[in-house]
Image (tube, rainbow, N blue to C red):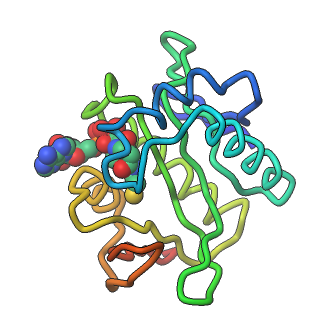
Amino acid sequence: MRLETARLVLRLLTPEDVDDLAAVLGDAETMRWYPAPYTREQVREGIERQMGSYPSGSGLLGMVEKQTGRLIGDCGVVWQDVEGRMEPEIGYHVHRGWWNRGLATEAARAAMDYAFGELGVDHVISMIRPENVPSRRVAEKNGLTMDRMVFWRDYDHCVYQRWKK
Ligand SMILES: CC(C)(COP(=O)(O)OP(=O)(O)OC[C@H]1O[C@@H](n2cnc3c(N)ncnc32)[C@H](O)[C@@H]1OP(=O)(O)O)[C@@H](O)C(=O)NCCC(=O)NCCS
């Protein structure tokens, strides 16, 4: 699994990425729509979880800016249990210093194309807290539309969805 866009490479995460990823997922402002920022240990566990899912072709990938070679976030396809059904979710997190440059949209588009192509799914979703306007914009810019609201992991979430054409 290695995806490439104009400005990004999405590649497998490794344990060496823990510090760069902790700079993203450990930031309180970035994680304001999550129960809490991740500790370094949670980031380490998260990387191991993603590594465990790579053999099945899913998992969050490291988002590397081509220009600098720096890991600035993650993005990929993650299978999520939503009301008892396993759904292919496009997930993304970007370092605060790189927001609003279209990078999440660019990465999510590549992950969606991969899901429809290599993974062979007929739809993708993104689970987004209603207040998370930037994430809703990313979904909308990639042609996902709000399908329904569900109570998921202790909070209301919009289920954004797009079917394969
Ligand atoms: C959501 C997130 C990944 C977006 O990353 P990004 O690279 O900045 O996204 P993009 O630049 O591709 O698009 C962001 C869009 O939100 C818009 N936006 C940002 N802040 C906004 C605000 N306060 N109000 C309205 N729109 C806003 C931007 O203008 C842009 O839309 P536009 O292109 O129509 O102008 C980033 O904000 C993030 O990492 N958030 C924390 C983690 C997170 O919530 N992940 C998603 C979980 S569902």
Q: Is residue 29 left or right of residue 154?
A: left
Q: Residue furthest right?
A: 55
Q: Is residue 109 above or below residue 74?
A: below
Give coordinates of residue 90: x percent, y percent.
Answer: 52, 59
Give coordinates of residue 16: x percent, y percent.
Answer: 73, 22
Give coordinates of residue 153: x percent, y percent.
Answer: 47, 72
Q: Residue furthest top?
A: 68
Give coordinates of residue 44: x percent, y percent.
Answer: 69, 36
Q: Nearer the viewer, residue 1 or 31?
A: 31
Q: Is residue 11 left or right of residue 72?
A: right
Q: Is residue 109 left or right of residue 160?
A: right
Examine the image and state in which quarter residue 142 appears: bottom left
Q: How many numbered circles does the render carry?
A: 0
Q: Residue at x 50, y 33 (%)?
A: 73
Q: Nearer the viewer, residue 1 or 48?
A: 48
Q: Is residue 127 above or below residue 28?
A: below
Q: Residue furthest bottom?
A: 84
Q: Is residue 5 above or below residue 80?
A: above
Q: Is residue 108 above or below residue 164?
A: above
Image quarter (top left, top right, bottom left or bottom right) of the N terminus: top right
Q: Residue at x 67, y 45 (%)?
A: 46
Q: Residue at x 28, y 30 (%)?
A: 101
Q: Is residue 66 left or right of residue 61?
A: left
